[in-house]
Image (cartoon, rainbow, N blue to C red):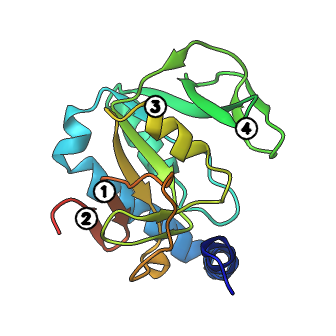
Amino acid sequence: MATSQDSKSTLRKQLRAKRRALSQESQRAAAEAVANHIAHSDLWHSANKVALYLATDGELDPGPLTTRAREASKVLCLPAVLPGKDMEFRLWETGADLSMNHYGIAEPAEGAPMEPDLICLPLVGWSRSGARLGMGGGYYDRFLAKHPASTTIGLAHAMQELDSIPSERWDMMIDYVATEDGLWNCHSR
């Protein structure tokens, strides 16, 4: 009998292959469109501290959004992996030293933890109900469970949308999803 974890693993493999297969042109266009959708939202205008990420494995690149955030003088932070499968967000200043974590992802080498107003996080899969499929490590789930005041926007390609996603009791829902096609409020359904 297939378990929820088996289903998630299969979905991850399929969706990661699909997003990696996107052309660089499609990736760039989607990243620009997502930045436009978010930058014109009330969420963006009311946020001071914004958490982003550095894209890997075909994730939607928040680079254009990073540029807009710096132009708007927002305080930026990036996730940093901690021992015990936890993470925190740390200040990300222009030109700051970054180091590679054990996943090969650059993160701030040091700094005090920050509590972002707005967390933009990568998605492998998503549904309009706010269910998300991540990479499977549970880092964002654990962080969000401890910091429910932060507003979350999942960044993804439209083709990563699923009608439903198998979930476990520890899976945290997200507030919004932004793709090249628009920005969806997951609580308005």
Taking depth in this image into account, of 90 and 174 the one nearest to the observer is 174
Front tag of 2 and 3: 3
Hey, which residue is sitting farthest front in the picture?
Answer: 1
Distance from Cα at disc 1 to Cα at disc 4: 25 Å
* Secondary structure state at the residue bearing disc 4: strand
Earlier in the chain: of badge 2 and badge 4, it is 4
Q: Which residue is label 1 attached to?
A: 176
Earlier in the chain: of badge 1 and badge 4, it is 4
Picture coordinates of residue 70 (x, y %)? 42, 31
Mark 3: which amino acid?
Lys
Distance from Cα at disc 3 to Cα at disc 4: 23 Å
Quarter of the image where one finds residue 116: top left
Mark 2: which amino acid?
Trp
Q: Which residue is label 2 attached to?
A: 184
Mark 1 burial class by Cα count in 10 Å: few <14, some 14-19, many 20+: many
112 over 3 or under it: above or below: above
Front tag of 1 and 3: 3
Front tag of 3 and 4: 3
Picture coordinates of residue 108 (x, y %)? 67, 25
* Secondary structure state at the residue bearing disc 3: helix
Mark 4 burial class by Cα count in 10 Å: few <14, some 14-19, many 20+: some
Earlier in the chain: of badge 2 and badge 3, it is 3
Q: Which residue is label 4 attached to?
A: 106
The reply to whether callout 2 and callout 1 are in contact (CB within 8 Å) is: yes
Picture coordinates of residue 25 (x, y %)? 56, 75
Front tag of 1 and 4: 1
Distance from Cα at disc 1 to Cα at disc 3: 19 Å
